Amino acid sequence: MTFAPLKTEQLESIASRLKAFAADFSHERLLEFSERLGALNTRERDRLSTDLMACYAVHESNEAFSLLYELNQEGVLGLIYHHLRRSFFSVDAQDILQEVFFNIYRYPKNFDSTKPSAFRNWTHSIVRNTTLKYSRKAQRNHVLSLTGPYRDGESDMPNLEPEDVDGRTPLQESQARETNEELVGAWMLYLHFYQEAYRCLTPREKRALYLVEVDEMPYKDAAAKLDVRVENLKMRIFRARRKIFTIMKYKFAAGEAASDCGPVRHSRAQSADAGRAPAADGRMHASAPAVEKLTSVRKTCFTSLKPKEEAELEGGA
């Protein structure tokens, strides 16, 4: 790693900042280097960078790291270009430069400042490893072209194109579509069972559950709106959720989805035909057999799931 010559305006700025930094930390050698910064030889430049890195490792001074970067960025960049000449794949040298100084910034405790050229050797190792990592990554992200295997017929080297890492094969697309369809079907079945279980709740339980879970109303506000105590509201919500859980668990275990859909559709069709009949038709007020059956099923469901006190009151009525 060779040091690039500093410009006149850059030299004056770095020298003044280095002098102020050396005075703050009472570093005599840095103070001496700041007075003749433009005339330092290679060994003295190595010692300057090593001392700045040692100060940064001990005091974690941002000014020390800033001076270190400005003094060495050109030399590190030249070393990166030297290593990239061995790489066939296109790699951005600025990205490697940023990664190198990021590693220097993160791991100052690993630096050993006993030798004058410690910073040069340590940085050289970081540059070599980082460049190799980026070159291997660029190699993994390239594939052989299927359309143009050779570059204009002038070279035997294969034409390389960047790999679309986000792209999916037709098989993956088909699998993803089937998975989404299965997921939608499962959710529709779940919602169907939940709707059937919700219909088995009492009006008071439906109202309480709607206020708490749909409107997201606090228990205190919902209890005030229903004119009940908070404890009673919580018990009502608990019973409603327990009923829904029990009914859905039974339906999932017994697999009654298909048997439930038939009577419901048939009853809706019969109700629609009865509504379109003339008003003078006496059969308009008569219940179809399927409707009577569905009504009896729902009545049994309501009666079996109501609390014991409510069932006895309705039976007495």
Image (cartoon, grey):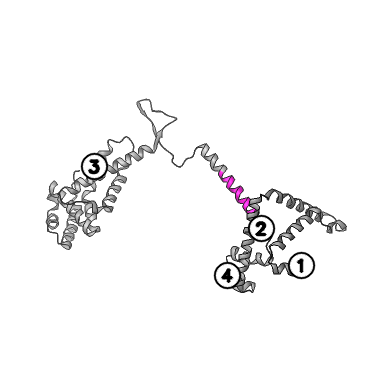
Q: How many marks?
A: 4
Q: Mark 4 or mark 2, which is nearer to you?
A: 2
The circle drawn on residue 219 is 4
Q: Give the alpha-carbon distance from disc 2 to disc 3, as whole Å.
A: 72 Å
Using residue 61 as the reference point, say whether residue 254 is left or right of it: right
Going from the N terminus, do you reach mark 2 or mark 3 first? 3
Q: Give the alpha-carbon distance from disc 4 to disc 2, as whole Å.
A: 23 Å
Q: Residue tagged by mark 1?
A: 315
Using residue 284 as the reference point, say whether residue 109 is left or right of it: left
Residue 205 quadrant: bottom right
Residue 293 quadrant: bottom right
Q: Residue tagged by mark 2?
A: 197
Q: Give the alpha-carbon distance from disc 4 to disc 1, as whole Å.
A: 32 Å
The circle drawn on residue 79 is 3
Residue 194 location in percent, x, y? 64, 56
Q: Label 2 is placed on what type of residue?
A: Ala
Q: Give the range drawn in magenta.
A: 179-196
Q: In this view, does 285 lie above or below 128?
A: below
CA neighbours of label 1 inside 10 A, class few (<14), some (14 to 19), many (20+): few
Going from the N terminus, do you reach mark 1 or mark 2 first? 2
Q: Mark 3 or mark 4, which is nearer to you?
A: 4
Helix, strand or loop for the magenta stretch, by majority? helix
**Callout 1–callout 3 Cβ contact below 8 Å:** no
Whether the magenta-drawn stretch holds residue 187 is answered as yes
Going from the N terminus, do you reach mark 3 or mark 4 first? 3
Q: Label 3 is placed on what type of residue?
A: Leu
Q: Label 4 is placed on what type of residue?
A: Tyr
CA neighbours of label 4 inside 10 A, class few (<14), some (14 to 19), many (20+): some
